[in-house]
Image (tube, helix red, strand yellow):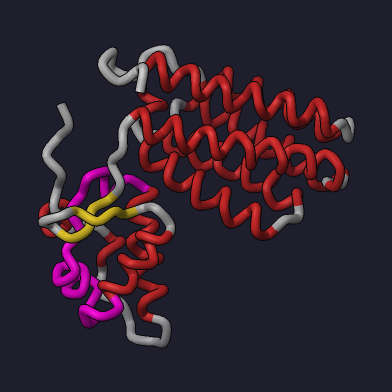
C-alpha cells in the first residue's frame, strides 16, 4: 500500500533545502534548483504534496516564482499535477519505470557508441577513477554515495558523446528514474557489485574504441536494471 503523501509543511520545515533565499535575479531558477535538489536527494519523497504558498513562505519569495519554479520542474517530469491538491513529487510505479527504461535504453546506447568514438585517454582514466571510488563506496555500504557515483559515471559518458540535445533528454530521464527508483537499491536481491561489473565492461569497450561492444555492454547494463525492477515489483504489477 502506498504511503500517504507527505506535505511540504510537515516534512521540510527543518531542511537546509528550505532556508529563505536572498533576492537576486532569476528567483524562479533558484526556486526550481532548491526543489530539484530536495527531490533528488529524497528530502521530498515521491508523492509529497507541494504547496505554492508554503514554498513561497519557506524560501522567502513571492508566490509567482514559487509557482513558476514548480512549472519548470513539471516540464522536467519531476513533479506532476494532482486534480485537487495542485502539484506533487512524481510517484509512479513499475509501469512508469519500465516506460522510462525503454526510452533510456535507446538514448544510453547511443551515448556509449559516441563515447567509444570520441573519448580520449584522459576521459577513460576519469571513468576508471570513478569506478575505483564507486568500489570503495560500496565497500563502506554508502547507498547514497552509490547513487551519486552511478549518476556521475553515466554523466561522464553522456558528456563525452558530445551531443547536447541527447544529453538534456537523458538528464531528465535519469532524474525521473532516480526519484521513482529511490527504493530499488534497498530491494532484496540488488547487487551493487553487478553494477560495478557492468560499468567496468563499458569502460573497457570505450577504452578499446569499440562502439559495437560499448553499445552491447550498455544495453546489457540497462537490461539488468529492467530485469531487477520487474523481479522487485509486487506480483500485481509485474506484468504492467
Q: Is residue 183 left or right of residue 143?
A: left
Magenta extent: 41-65
Instruction: Determine the residue positioned at 48% across, 27% down.
Output: 140
**Near-viewer residue (197 or 15):** 197
Q: Quadrant of the C terminus?
A: top left
Residue 42 figure quarter: top left
Can you say whether 198 is above or below 3 in the image? above
Instruction: Determine the residue positioned at 42% across, 37% down.
Output: 144
Q: Is residue 45 magenta?
A: yes
Picture coordinates of residue 184 (x, y %)? 39, 27
Picture coordinates of residue 131 (x, y %)? 66, 32
Q: Is residue 196 left or right of residue 147?
A: right
Instruction: Determine the residue positioned at 50% across, 44% down.
Output: 174
Residue 63 figure quarter: bottom left
Q: Is residue 21 magenta?
A: no
Picture coordinates of residue 208 (x, y %)? 88, 30
Picture coordinates of residue 75 (x, y %)? 41, 61
Amino acid at each position: 500500500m502506498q504511503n500517504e503523501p507527505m506535505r511540504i509543511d510537515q516534512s521540510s520545515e527543518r531542511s537546509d533545502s528550505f532556508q529563505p533565499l536572498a533576492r537576486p535575479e532569476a528567483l524562479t531558477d533558484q526556486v526550481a534548483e532548491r526543489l530539484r535538489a530536495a527531490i533528488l536527494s529524497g528530502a521530498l519523497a515521491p508523492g509529497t504534496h507541494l504547496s505554492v504558498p508554503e514554498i513561497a513562505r519557506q524560501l522567502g519569495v513571492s508566490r509567482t516564482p514559487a509557482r513558476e519554479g514548480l512549472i519548470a520542474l513539471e516540464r522536467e517530469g519531476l513533479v506532476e499535477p494532482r486534480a485537487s491538491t495542485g502539484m506533487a513529487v512524481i510517484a509512479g510505479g513499475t509501469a512508469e519505470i519500465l516506460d522510462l527504461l525503454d526510452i533510456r535504453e535507446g538514448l544510453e546506447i547511443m551515448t556509449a557508441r559516441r563515447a567509444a568514438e570520441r573519448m580520449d585517454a584522459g576521459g577513460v582514466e576519469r571513468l576508471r577513477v570513478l569506478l575505483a571510488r564507486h568500489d570503495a563506496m560500496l565497500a563502506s555500504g554508502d547507498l547514497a554515495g552509490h547513487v551519486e557515483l552511478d549518476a556521475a559515471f553515466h554523466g561522464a559518458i553522456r558528456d563525452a558523446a558530445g551531443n547536447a540535445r541527447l544529453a538534456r533528454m537523458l538528464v531528465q530521464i535519469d532524474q525521473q528514474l532516480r526519484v521513482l527508483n529511490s527504493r530499488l537499491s534497498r530491494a532484496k536481491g540488488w547487487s551493487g557489485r553487478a553494477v560495478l561489473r557492468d560499468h567496468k565492461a563499458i569502460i573497457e569497450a570505450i577504452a578499446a574504441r569499440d562502439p559495437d561492444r560499448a553499445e552491447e555492454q550498455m544495453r546489457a547494463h540497462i537490461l539488468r536494471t529492467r530485469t531487477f525492477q520487474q523481479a522487485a515489483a509486487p506480483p500485481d504489477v509485474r506484468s504492467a
